[in-house]
Image (cartoon, helix red, strand yellow):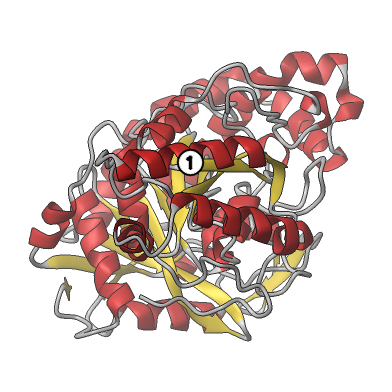
Amino acid sequence: MTTPSPGPFTGPFTGRTLDDLGRDLRAGRTTAAELTALALDAIATGGAELNAFVTVDAAGAAEAARRADEELAAGIDRGPLHGIPAGVKDLIMIAGMRVTMGSRHFASHVADADAACVARLRRAGAVVVGTTTTHEFAYGPTGDRSAGGAARNPWDPSRMTGGSSAGSGAAVAAGLVPLALGTDTGGSVRIPAALCGVAGFKPAYGAIPADGVFPLSRTLDHVGVLAATASCCLLAYDALADSPVPVDLVDSVGEVRVGWLEPDSLFPTDPRVADTARAAVGPVASEVRMAPEVLELFRETYLAVQSGETAAVHADRLAAAPGLFDPEVLDRLRQAAELPAWRYLRAMEARQALEEHAEALFGPYDVLATPTVPILAPPIGARESEAGGERIQVRAALLGMTSPWNVLGRPALTVPAGLVDGLPVGLQLIARRGGEARLFAAARQVESGQDRGAGLRA
């Protein structure tokens, strides 16, 4: 699949998949050192304007690339990520590197050990080039509240990337790196992937270990990946996960039954966004709707769980140095701290009921499809927008389609669906538990754009 170029920000990895790069490496047409040099140069130019990266480890990356080339020359091949430059969200620990969580509280913090996912990334032969911009403490889906400033969307730098994995979305979309890690608590991998026009995968809860990741909400946090295509995300996931999904298993999947989850049953949606995402699925997907009372239970549960757990993480900082927080993040933390304990406990109990509601919603389908985000990327700093003739809150809109699947820990994937007014639209695919192979098979069908409907049956 060839991805469209986001305007003037065409980096060295735009439109190049991990398979493409791997073939070039193994055929001797390039080296890991050359790929890493391309990434570092692009980060210093386009990356600077987009504010995609926070800390860049040029020397460490060059050394890792040299080792990767030596290993390939010696016949040691660590797999599809061998020699591939990668970015890592700025709250995932990287030994010896400055990792700030996007906050003045940690402006000089240097990690003393790799997070488990970074250790696995290195073990797979990837070259870690630096940390990517995050919304402060990952506490926001807009990506424009960070100690280092807002990340900017490569399609229009006046627009949000979405968050909280803001820099990861911008870096992959602009072709600065072919792969980046993010975290997803309510949509924080899928939202920037969708608004920036790339693929983003939120695995099932715990599928990629979160050890060494600064927490936002411990029972909602997921480690995920962003790349050009769903197939690239699968290759990265297989290198990072406890239980990989072999590509040949995806190849062997037959019929995938996909239902169209009517977006207006989740959140007021821009009709152009809905139509673009719906067209990407094809004409055979039947429609299902989430009942209003189920949606309300999802929202209440997500808010209560996230608020209770986030307030616990930041209670000491909130008491000792509130002035170091971004004002908007501070205001949200103070609101979270006011949540009664009984609401958190009741929300944790509600998750089982929501599992039953989700099973009923899926019905005969393997995968549900809906727009990833119901609106186009808003201007940086915007907190209100419009969708379907209604005034809406931007934060609520960005999370409206994605957060239920964090409550349940279900695997969910966003892939590019098309453009509206020159801005990307994402299509979100959600799977049943254990349905990763069918999820990626459905994504492959959407991305190929060939023989639509042959593998997606209602």
Q: What element carries label 1?
A: helix
Q: Where's the C terminus, which quadrant? A: bottom left
Residue under the point 18% across and 54% down: 247
Whether residue 63 is visible: yes
Task: Give the camera-side residue of 19 and 107.
Answer: 19
Residue 418 spot, x, y in % from top left: 47, 80
Is 202 situated above or below 421? Answer: above
Residue picked out by circle 1 = 66
Residue under the point 55% across and 67% down: 12
Residue 140 spot, x, y in % from top left: 67, 45
Residue under the point 55% across and 29% down: 217
Determine the image quadrant of residue 366. bottom left
Residue 74 spot, x, y in % from top left: 28, 39
Q: What residue type is labelled 1?
A: Arg
Residue under the point 24% across and 84% down: 450
Task: Give the camera-side residue of 39 and 405.
Answer: 39
Residue 68 spot, x, y in % from top left: 41, 41
Whether residue 183 is visible: no
Q: How crowded is mark 1: few (under 14 residues within 10 Å), some or many (20 or more)?
A: some
Is 78 situated above or below 227? Answer: above
Task: Give the camera-side residue of 21 and 402.
Answer: 21
Left or right of residue 264: residue 40: right
Q: Where's the N terminus, which quadrant? A: bottom left
Is 403 situated above or below 43? Answer: above
**Count of marks, rendered view:** 1
